[in-house]
Image: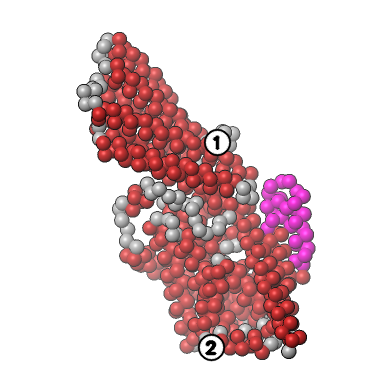
Amino acid sequence: MSETFNEIFTSTILVLGGLGLFLLGMRIMSTGLQTIAGDRLQGFLKKATSNRLLAVFVGIVATVGLNSSTASTVMTVSFVNSGLMNLSQAIGVIMGANVGTTLSAHLFTFRIDAYAPIFIFIGIVMYLFIKKKKVKNIGYVILGFGILFFGITTMGGPLREMGRTDAFQSILLIFENPFLALLAGFAFTAMVQSSTAATGVLVFMYAQGVPIPFETGAFIILGTNLGTSITTLIASIPANRASKRAALFHITFDIIGSLVFGLIIFFIPSILAWFQSVWYHPASQIAWFHTLYNFATLFLLLPFATLLARLMEKVIPVKEIEMADATFEKKLMYIDTKVAVAPPTAVLNAHMELCRMGKIAKENLAISLDAFFERSPEKVKRVFDNESVVNYLNHNIAAKLAWINRMELSDAEAKRVGNMFWILSDIERISDHAENIAEYAEILIDNEKLKFSDEAISELKTLGGVTLDLLEVAFEVYENQDESKLPQVQILEDRTDDLSGEYTENHVNRLIAETCEPRCGAIFTDMIGDLERSGDHGNNIAFSILPNRK
């Protein structure tokens, strides 16, 4: 009795250790692939147009390339959050991601675990001893691949032995209940945050001859699809309402698929018999069930995607002011996620957070000018409130950038993050200048007798308008990394410099002619300086996208 207990205990420890190695290898391999292909796949994801079939294809390719439906769907939620992708496009990508993740399961049907130590050795040599970043990243992927299959080797023998025990057979009897089998798949996937890993473990168990009834395995697969949507739901928590609609669609899509096909295989078990007759090996049977089930769900729901999108908008209603309200909240919206992300996704999220901060700073400058010209106490207060948000973002984004900088970044990503520190400072200074102008507005509000000449007001309005135009184009250039509009930025920057010089000279002439009060003259000069320097910061931000800047 004692000897049997010791054998079971030892087997359990080996299985758990092997499972840990498997999950670690999966994470390393997925992170490495995202580091290598992240930038290209992010650009590829952005090309998902209103053509839903193209969006589905993009979702499949991105998921296969990243080896993670979680990564591609979380990235999609980020794009929706930033406005780079609408709900209709996101729906197609999410559908494609569900199909793309099934292809990895077929990898585990091949018996290549015996070569795992070779992959580990090659990967660790490339990662530790070769300095070239690209080669190191490839070595990291190979290392993860080797660790993954070494975990499989570690689990193999103990799983076969456990499968023959009466205790294990008794546990399997419990999961003959379809609901409990589905719940098991859901819980394990939600825990490891990877349907690829959960399905891989199941396929491997079949490959090792663990006697799991095929019907039980089918319902576990349905549960894994539900489990993976939980990660997307978590990622949408700090995001805006549009992102929450995309996440809600993901879980709705999986619930409908699991419900429909769960009922079909429960009442028509001959479908499962067909799988078993077509594919002889049990591992291939479960892998192909996973793939064909997701394809079937795709074809079932694709015609109703527009209706489902409308349903999501009914459940989470569209509000005209929701984006404006969210933009000025004192919180991180993109990089304060509770879901672990790979370096390319972290860099993308930081970029979107900076773009959001830039829009706040630009809007704050516009409000400060209105506050000045209208002598509005309410708008002065709004400027100070927005400046508080910008300061909060400046501090917290800097901390997050330092954290991202410690990740395994590619050379391009490392340079991009380095630039972000400079851009962060430029954006913060623009809002500081807005705060200065709001303080000038307070002086005018407190001293009603202070009057500017019509000529001075006209000049300030003209310079303010050009500066705001410059910032609008500059942030557009930075957000889209679009070099084609840099000449327009340069023209506007030259215009602000020319106007600043011209208006300063006019101001001196007015002082000499005594047509301007000296105290108003000091405010005028300071405002010219604030607007001109705001334009300089906008110019810095736009031209930071060039390879050799900063």
Distance between the Cα atoms at labels 2 and 1?
61 Å
Residue 96 visible, this orientation: no
Colour mode of the rendering = secondary structure
For this view, does 419 lie left or right of residue 136?
left
Above or below 544: residue 172 = below
119 magenta-colored: yes
Which residue is at 34% across, 63% downward? Answer: 316
Which residue is at 74% across, 86% downward? Answer: 2
Find the magenta span and give its range.
115-141
Q: Amino acid at mark 2?
A: Ser
What number is the disc on residue 231? Answer: none
Of the image marks 2 and 1, the number of the one nearer the N terminus: 2
Residue 282 visible, this orientation: yes
Above or below 133: residue 114 = below
Which residue is at 48% across, 43% downward? Answer: 395
Image location of residue 398, percent across then percent down: 52, 43
On-image quarter of the N terminus = bottom right
- Dot 1 falls on a residue whose secondary structure is loop
Image location of residue 15, percent across then percent down: 69, 75
What number is the disc on residue 270? Answer: 2
Find out whether the residues at labels 2 and 1 contact each other: C-beta distance under 8 Å: no
For this view, does 477 lie left or right of residue 402?
left
Image location of residue 61, percent across then percent down: 56, 60
Q: Residues within 10 Å of mark 2 (few under 14, many from 20)?
A: few
Please give the residue where the numbered disc 1 appears in the rendered image.
Answer: 546
Q: Amino acid at mark 1?
A: Leu
Task: Name the residue nearer the viewer: 122 or 299.
Answer: 122
Q: Main secondary structure of the magenta part?
A: helix
Which residue is at 35% across, 42% downward? Answer: 385
Q: Residues within 10 Å of mark 1 (few under 14, many from 20)?
A: few
Please count the marks in the image.
2
